[in-house]
Image (cartoon, rainbow, N blue to C red):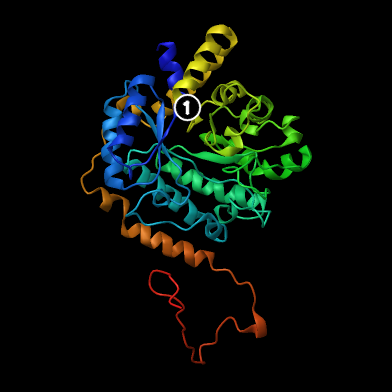
Amino acid sequence: MTLDEKVGQLFVPMVFSEQEEKHFEEIKSLIEKHHLGGLIFSLGSPDKQSKWLNEFQSVSKVPLLISMDAEWGVAMRLDSVVAFPWNMTLGAAQNDEVLRKIGQRMGEQERALGVHMSYAPVLDINTNPNNPIIGNRSFGESPTLVARKGLAIMRGHHDAGRLTSGKHFPGHGDTAQDSHKTLPTLSFDRDRIENNELLPFKKLIENGISSIMVAHLNVPALTGSNLPTSLSYKVVTELLKEQLGFNGLIVTDALNMKGASDYTELDNIDLAAFIAGNDVLLISNNIPLGIDKIKQAVLNTPQLNIRLEESVKKILKAKYKVGLSNYKPINRNNLLEKINTRLDSLLIQDAFAESITLLKNDNNLLPLDTISKYAHLKMGDARGNSIF
């Protein structure tokens, strides 16, 4: 591979199949000119996304690694698909096997759509009620519970042959700000972070998580500065790679988020993320500029060429693992039937049944006796919308 082709493998832009032809042509041009490594698909429809994806793959010399941010299945981004319960619901389920089965069905949906990686499971711990962005995306407030539930979802995806990504390292749960809009701060000491926030990540690393997504957080106890964790060599390389021994793919959270893009003390955010140790640069604000900055740095610093080789090998290994060495276009026949099955409805029903939680039992009303008569008052229509 040429230097241009190697550097291009690092970059993954976002694609919205709900948009018009102009957007399609812009992404296609990026693939052809800059040898992109992959795409992350967002809002759209299954049919249009699969149509676009087949065309994008046809113009890429090296098959693209396709990802989605699909925490509760591809319905998080696509219309016409049944949605699995959010993580807070699954965190209440008593039977982890239900989560593993749901994880497997999520992976099977992704496979039918030509998607190789889901940016899931969320491993943040829901310990701050003022958190504006995590909340019910978390499995719960216990580090061991979050680890257990995340492991079940991860294993289900792996059963379906899909890659996974634990997020948001080193832990976005105990913040009161949204990293899409600003740089949140975790002011805890290192011992607290290592024994609490990092526990789910350690558990899933031990069990073979495919990738880790690094958040844009201000964690002075880890960075020794106000540098976002996603751009910190101390966090990405020294902590995640060296201390925790993670050798899978390392992915930045979206680089267009304000938590990273507003940081102005660096020449180029893409280059800083690469130097920190990230392999995949997600949703850069300016891919051509980022490629140029990384190329010049690699040419001027031989040690960075070794870093580039390491990242590209990991990306190509991931592509091989999901079968892209024998790439075949998506079979779009009966696609909606493949991703909406009776099994999905039954799994959702099982998950809700397993997740019913008794919060109060005043006057020992439960369990209900079998003699009395009871009335049922419905509080919404069949779609779950209020009728008042």
In the figure, residue 378 lies in which quadrant? bottom left
From the image, tell me which residue sits under label 1. Answer: 286
* Left or right position of 100 against 243: left
The residue under the point 57% across, 13% down is 304
In the figure, residue 343 lies in which quadrant? bottom left
Count how many numbered circles sit on residues in the image. 1
The residue under the point 51% across, 64% down is 354
Which residue appears farthest toward the bottom when viewing the image?
Answer: 372
* Left or right position of 12 against 323: right
The residue under the point 52% across, 17% down is 294
Q: Quadrant of the N terminus?
A: top left
Query: Residue 291, percent across and down?
Result: 47, 19
The residue under the point 28% across, 25% down is 59
Query: Residue 113, percent across and down?
Result: 32, 42
Q: Image height check: is 378 above or below 304?
A: below
In the figure, residue 162 lies in which quadrant? top left
Query: Residue 105, percent across and down?
Result: 39, 50
Which secondary structure lies at badge 1? loop
